[in-house]
Amino acid sequence: MAKIISGKEVSAFVKGEAAKEVKTLNEKGISVCLAVILVGDDPASAVYVNNKKKACEVCGIKSLQYILPESTTEQELLTLIEKLNNDMEVNGILCQLPLPEHINEETVINAISPKKDVDCFHPENVGRLHIGNGTFKPCTPAGVMEMIHFAGIQVRGKKCVVVGRSNIVGKPMGALLMAEDGTVTICHSKTQNLEEYTKNADILVVAMRQPRYITGDMVKDSAVVVDVGIHRLDDGTLCGDVDFNSVEKKASYITPVPGGVGPMTIAILMQNTVTAAKMQNGLI
Ligand code: GUN
């Protein structure tokens, strides 16, 4: 039976560390502020944005929320971002994705100042991440790394397989595992014989947006299995990309859904916001 790595526990630890740093900054007269923008009324996005506000409260970070209607034009959004880029009070800016179809995501990501890009989505920060001199961490992959570290798992020399190649998870996940000397394979929707790869993995990170796709027979004995997926089934229950019941019988460690990687993303966002404030105040 696998040991469970609790995202609730690890995220509480990371947020606690961030809160301590905020307190120290406040004592120096420095406040920490995150601006979050939501365009449109996607219910899942609204929940995420609300969770970010709550996490800011826990950490002592001031949060500004800009909830804009679906009809917002790209130019209106870019004007708001420019205002926030120039606002000395604002340390981090996050624009919740996905955006409505009439707004170009790449244009918006590029418009956020790289110094305030707490999502680590701007090409300058993505480039720095791959070179290995980044300041901001990609939130979800860095959250996965925190969980791996918390469980005392070494990445060096391990066969690491990432299923998914998105800009938000798969690609930066590969970069972070490589930075810790993992031997990384990235699989995706066009990979043939996926199970040939997954069966070989010492560390398997799954972000493929397919409910319960990875089953016990696709996993090596004693593998570490991290599930980034989240899906709501017709009966209302939540599940991940991993079939928890069959995989937990084979894995050495597994992350649950819910209560696994999900809470970690926001915890790293808090960490990045603190980093932004320190950077903008010449402390790093
Ligand atoms: N949508 C889903 N995940 C994310 C994220 O990490 N950041 C932003 N900005 N939007 C998202």
Image (cartoon, rainbow, N blue to C red):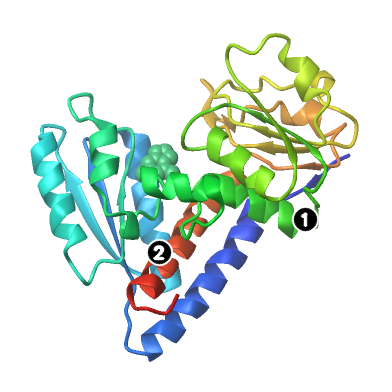
Image side of residue 250 versus residue 12, left or right: right
Q: Quadrant of the C terminus?
A: bottom left
Helix, strand or loop at label 1? It is: loop
Image side of residue 90 versus residue 20, left or right: left
Compared to residue 234, the image places residue 120 above or below, namely below
Image side of residue 28 versus residue 105, left or right: right
Instruction: Please report the residue visible at 58 percent of the width from the left and 26 percent of the height from the top.
Output: 164
Amino acid type of the residue that numbered disc 2 sits on in the rendered structure: Thr
Q: Nearer the viewer, residue 152 or 212?
A: 152
Q: Nearer the viewer, residue 168 or 125?
A: 125
Residue 151 is labelled as 1
Q: Nearer the viewer, residue 172 or 262?
A: 172
Residue 102 in the image: state x and y as whole percent: 17, 25
Residue 147 in the image: state x and y as whole percent: 68, 53
Compared to residue 142, the image places residue 88 above or below, namely below
Residue 250 in the image: state x and y as whole percent: 87, 31
Residue 273 is labelled as 2
Instruction: Please report the residue visible at 37 percent of the width from the left and 90 percent of the height from the top.
Output: 28
Marks 2, 1: nearer the viewer:
2
